[in-house]
Image: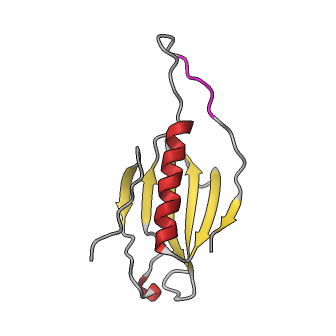
Amino acid sequence: MNPVHFNAIGAKVVYNALYDDPDPSLRAQDISLLQLADKTYVDVGWYPQFDPNGTFVITHYKGDWDHIVKTICTPRVSSVVETVDDLARNAIARRPRTASGTGKSTSVANYNPPFVRVA
C-alpha cells in the first residue's frame, strides 16, 4: 500500500506515512510532517495512537510546538488531505516577499490560532 499523496503546493514533505487504511487500530501518532512555503510546519497524527475511536489531529505550527497556529481534528483521511493542501496554498500567500530591489520584506498576515473540528 502506498502513502496518500498530498497536493501541497510549495510544501516540502519531511515524512509521510498517511495511508487510507480502513483499520484505524493500525494508525500511529506520528504520521506526516510537511514544511510549508512560509516556513511553518504541518504535523499529522492519530490520537490516541492505535485507538480505533481516535481522530486525526492536524497541527499547524511556526518553528516549534510552543508556537501553534491552528489545530484541526477530523476522522477522515480525505479531510486530512484537503486541510493540508489548503494550509499549503494559504502559506504561499503568507510567505514573506521581498520588495523589488529593496531587499526588505513586506508584511505577513497575522491570525489567531483557532481550534477547528472537522466532521
Residue 22: horizontal and vertical position, in percent?
A: 41, 86
**Please, which residue is most extreme toward the top here?**
101
Compared to residue 80, the image places residue 108 above or below, namely: above
By secondary structure, the bulk of the magenta-drawn segment is best described as: loop
Q: Count the marks: how many? A: 0
Q: Is residue 106 magenta?
A: yes
- Which quadrant of the structure image shows residue 106? top right
In the image, residue 9 above or below residue 105: below
Q: Name the residue: 43% across, 69% down.
A: 31
Provide residue 12's location: percent of width, then percent of height. 38, 49
Asked whether residue 102 is drawn in magenta, I would say no
> Can you say whether 61 is above or below 98 in the image?
below
In the image, is 12 to the left or to the right of 103? left
Q: Nearer the viewer, residue 2 or 41?
A: 2
For the point 32% across and 69% down, the residue is 3
Residue at 53%, 30% (x, y): give it: 96
Q: Is residue 39 above or below residue 81?
A: above
User: What segment carries the magenta color?
Assistant: 104-108
> The C terminus appears in which quarter of the rendering?
bottom right
Q: Nearer the viewer, residue 116 or 119?
A: 119
